[in-house]
Image (tube, helix red, strand yellow):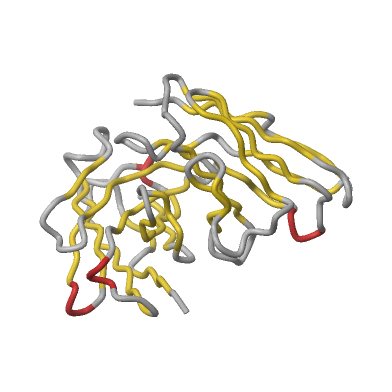
Amino acid sequence: EVQLVESGGGLVQPGASLKLSCVASGFTFSDYWMSWVRQTPGKTMEWIGDIKYDGSYTNYAPSLKNRFTISRDNAKSTLYLQMSNVRSEDTATYYCTRYYGYNCMDAWGQGASVTVSS
Amino acid sequence: DVQMTQSPSNLAASPGESVSINCKASKSISKYLAWYQQKPGKANKLLIYSGSTLQSGTPSRFSGSGSGTDFTLTIRNLEPEDFGLYYCQQHNEYPYTFGAGTKLELK
């Protein structure tokens, strides 16, 4: 069974950094592009970015490119999202997803909740 | 960025009825439109991709149509488990973008 389990969320102060992790199981992690998507409290979904199966290439939403970094460790079947200089508008549930076919998302984690507040 | 306009934002229906959800792209996205279902306590589920291709495991009462800028998700003969939140997403060009969502509620 394909599983994606995010961790690392919580309450963080504005301006701080936070690193989310997503552990994958049930498939060969190193064969797949992966991505991060977030959902605001108002239920708006936003694509954050993605990473090639070997970690050699990443793409980002332009509005987040300067503060968010996606990486992966294929030996650990783990995807990461490094968030820096967080703002209140980064408050959201963060999902890792697996790409299928032409970059649609056929597997989602349960999400990690991040709240940015002082 | 490609803007995705999804309608309606809310939809109330009864089991056995048929409903349609629309998604309009601000520019042509060819056929590359996906539909997802979100339900509390469950992982989001890919229902349809490339406009009309059913993902493995998606019941046949779901169907997708459209190309270019206008797309529709139709659910026929609604089952109780179909109620939830639905999103469209264009997977044609970066940055990938989502519609605002449609909440399908029990009437």
> Residue A9: x and y, percent?
37, 64
Q: Position of residue B21 (x, y in %)?
A: 68, 35
Front-most of residues A4 and A116: A4
- x, y (%) of residue B27? 42, 20
Q: Is residue B60 above or below residue A88?
A: below
Q: Position of residue A26 (x, y in %)?
A: 39, 79
Q: Residue at x 37, y 43 (%)?
A: A47
| Nearer the observer, A8 or B9 | B9
Say whether residue A117 is visible: no
| Rendered view: A94 above or below B52 | below
Q: Residue furthest top?
A: B27
Q: Residue B54 vs residue B68: left or right? A: right
Q: Residue at x 47, y 42 (%)?
A: B50
Which quarter of the figure has residue A24? Answer: bottom left
Residue B45 higher or lower than B101, as above or below:
below
Residue in the image at 27% along x and 33% along y: A63
Regarding residue B69, the answer to whether it shows in the image is yes
Quadrant in which residue B7 is drawn? top right
Return the residue found at the far left: A56
| Residue ID at (52%, 34%) | B99
Q: Nearer the viewer, residue A71 or B71?
A: B71
How many tags in the picture?
0
Q: In the picture, residue B104 is in which quadrant?
A: top right
Horizontal arrangement in the rendering, residue A33 relative to residue A73 (left or right): right
